[in-house]
Amino acid sequence: MLTRQIRNVLICTMLGLGTAEAGPLENLNPGEWYEVPNSHMSALTPPVLPDGRTSNHNVIAAYSGAAYDSTRDRLMVWGGGHEDYAGNELYAFDVNTLRWLRLTDPSIPAPQSVEAAPDGNPTSRHTYDGLEYIPTTDQFWASNGSLWSPGGTGTNGTWTYNLSESPPRWQRQADSPGPDKLGAASAYDPTTGLVWFEGKAGMLSTYDPSKPSSPWTVRRDSDTIPLHAAGAIDPRRRILLVMGNGEAYVNDISHASGTVSQQPLNSSGATEVMTSQTGSFLAPGLAYDSVSDKFVAWIGGPNIYTLNMDTLVWTKITPAATNTVTPPDVTASGGTFGRFQYIRSKNVFIVVNSTDENVFFYKLGIGTAPPPPVKPAQ
């Protein structure tokens, strides 16, 4: 008697349906990179740009980041600003189709040194590591940055792009407290549903999307972080790691209230991840991997670095012998910021560092990501 699996294969073959095949991400082995062919974001440059330019190059190249929409498996990229790019259009790379999407068109005209364009959308800005996706409210979240203008006006402006609305739309939220932040590090906390945010001028705060009228809570009003930094959260140990410009800081976020202290990361091992970057003053790609239970950093090229928070030891991971792909060095101003993300559903990492380069994926290890932490009852 034929087994059910063999019988189904024969039926599909006779009907000309074929059988499902694994895609390139599923076929990745640990230690291997994959380069998506023909995946330049520049192919989606709008036909008309607000300042007469012919390229969207500085959406990525000029101190800007990204966030990962885990509901739709899309890397969402937004940036520009200062004197680099006036277009405020929003892009997303769909991991299931391996194709770029332009979700919005640029606002025309694009006024300078103001928070919102005449159409009500936020104006272009350097976004640094100030972008997050909030799954509980299905929102792409952005806060602070350097607005489009020759002078690079700083802003406290906070916005959400509400993806579940039809059609999706931008909506301004309460401004962040304290001085405007030229430079930012942020991270979404899956345990509490909060976004943790810190700017170069200091002031560590949380943003609670369930309290739109008063979402911000200041947790520290001192210390500073580098201009070019990235943040990530270890939800198991309740640690916020902020890293960049050769510096790294640990924040204990285990307490629901009170002041959060900032301590330097006293690590050992392959600490060249802190300083050996192409160029200077760069923010690394930084994420937490729930399978290996480690922070993972990327600073360009083929190597990956992992940080064990129990031993505080960095380990350099070189490519597997079977690897045939090497991502280029980082050329974007300021570094990678949030354009390096861990994809829980695929157990791979994604990174993009230029509108004129392809998108890359990396597989660290074997395993299945555990489900995200459940937010505790209030």
Image (cartoon, rainbow, N blue to C red):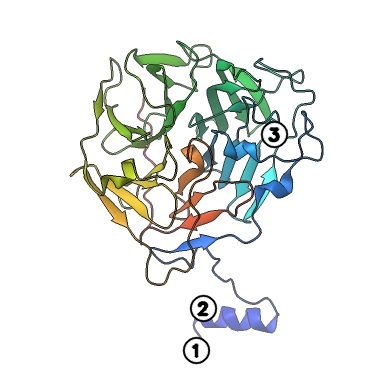
Pick whichever, 254 or 211, lies toward us. Answer: 254
Furthest-left residue in this view = 311
Label 2 – label 3 distance at C-alpha: 47 Å
Question: 10 Å neighbourhood of mark 3: few (<14), some, or many (≥20)?
Answer: many
Q: Amino acid at mark 1?
A: Met
Furthest-front residue in this view = 279
Side of 68 relative to 355 (left or right):
left
Give the mark nearest the N terminus, 1 or 3: 1
Question: 10 Å neighbourhood of mark 2: few (<14), some, or many (≥20)?
Answer: few
Residue 293 visible (yes or no): no
Residue 119 position in % (x across, y down): 76, 21
Side of 262 relative to 156 (left or right):
left
Badge 1 marks a residue whose secondary structure is loop
Badge 3 marks a residue whose secondary structure is loop
Furthest-right residue in this view = 48
**Which of the labelled discs sits on residue 1, or is there none?**
1
